[in-house]
Image (cartoon, rainbow, N blue to C red):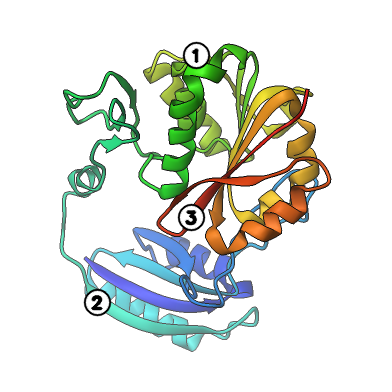
Amino acid sequence: MFELVLLADEPAVESLTDALLEEWQALSASVEDADAAAPGERALFGEPGLPAPPGAWQRSRVLALFTDEAAAQVAAAQLLARQHEEGAVHIEALREVADQDWVRLTQSQFDPVAITERFWIVPSWHDVPPAATRTIRLDPGLAFGTGTHPTTRMCLRWIARHADTLAPAWRRTLDYGCGSGVLAIAAALHGAHGIDALDIDAAAVDAARVNAAANGVTMRTGSPDLAHDAYDLVLANILATPLRLLAPMLCGHVAPGGHLVLSGILARQADELIQAYAPWLSLHIADEDDGWIAMHAQRGT
């Protein structure tokens, strides 16, 4: 197989990917932030009540996979001949990629993850480790949340470490931006009730529903407009910018005496989150892992 790597300005990405798939018969076309891990990196997000997110990053890297070199070269030649009124497109590379067992390769990237000594996330193709007394069986799907990222691990740790004393009071629980549903499932396994796992992404809602069933967990999944007024536990593992903008809404969902747990936040962003939530709740850093933090607040009774 051969991979054609392109750099594209934001306005050109949609028409470029359409052309690659429909006109030039690419097997696949994926888009990533060309400025990832650089100062120009920009997160894409969309939430109810906020402006619609842009369709792509300011500079995107588009990777198109073709069955053979000739097909990739035809696409590259036609691309160079075409005028892109929407924005600039440049060819970065044309390279051969080895044929692989993609399913086995994907599975090899996900091993069991220890959240605590006895609480583990275990992909379905792995055996449960002997030390695990409580497990989530989770397959990586189209949704974020496999337990491997520090932000997810910290939220899971918070649930596991506080469940013995707090879970009896978790009569209603919200996982906002639920992704794979891993936080909602963890809360259920640790004794939470009345769980809503909500997300703006339909693929995430589907993944959460499937993963809940696989773990024998009952919870309601759907879009954020299904949220109740108040919850005893509110979990939101998103990113700092949407968390800051969603502060009034998320705080409004925390019941008297209830707890709010946030992650997706870099350590250097702590102060801006504390200030954003200050009119409603007093946030503090609850955990730190590899440059990321989890934050917690409790509403007074």
Closer to us: 66 or 147: 147
Closer to us: 265 or 198: 265
> Label 3 sits on what residue type?
Trp
| Residue tagged 2 | 95
Q: CA distance from mark 2 to mark 3?
A: 35 Å
Q: Is residue 299 among what the camera can see? A: yes
How crowded is the residue under tag 1: few (<14 C-alpha within 10 Å), some, or many (20+)?
some
Q: Residue at x 18, y 27 (%)?
A: 129
| Residue tagged 1 | 191
Closer to us: 69 or 89: 89
> Label 1 sits on what residue type?
Gly
Label 2 or label 3, whichever comes before in sequence order: 2
Quadrant of the rendering where the C terminus is positioned:
top right
Res. 27 image quadrant: bottom left
| Residue tagged 3 | 292
Q: Is residue 62 rendered to the left or right of residue 249?
A: left
SS label for mark 2? strand
Q: Is residue 143 among what the camera can see? A: no
Res. 116 image quadrant: top left
Q: Is residue 113 rendered to the left or right of residue 280?
A: left
How crowded is the residue under tag 2: few (<14 C-alpha within 10 Å), some, or many (20+)?
some
Closer to us: 136 or 192: 192
Q: How many marks?
A: 3
Percent across and percent down for residue 87 are 61, 81
Q: Residue at x 47, y 79 (%)?
A: 7
Q: Residue at x 19, y 30 (%)?
A: 126
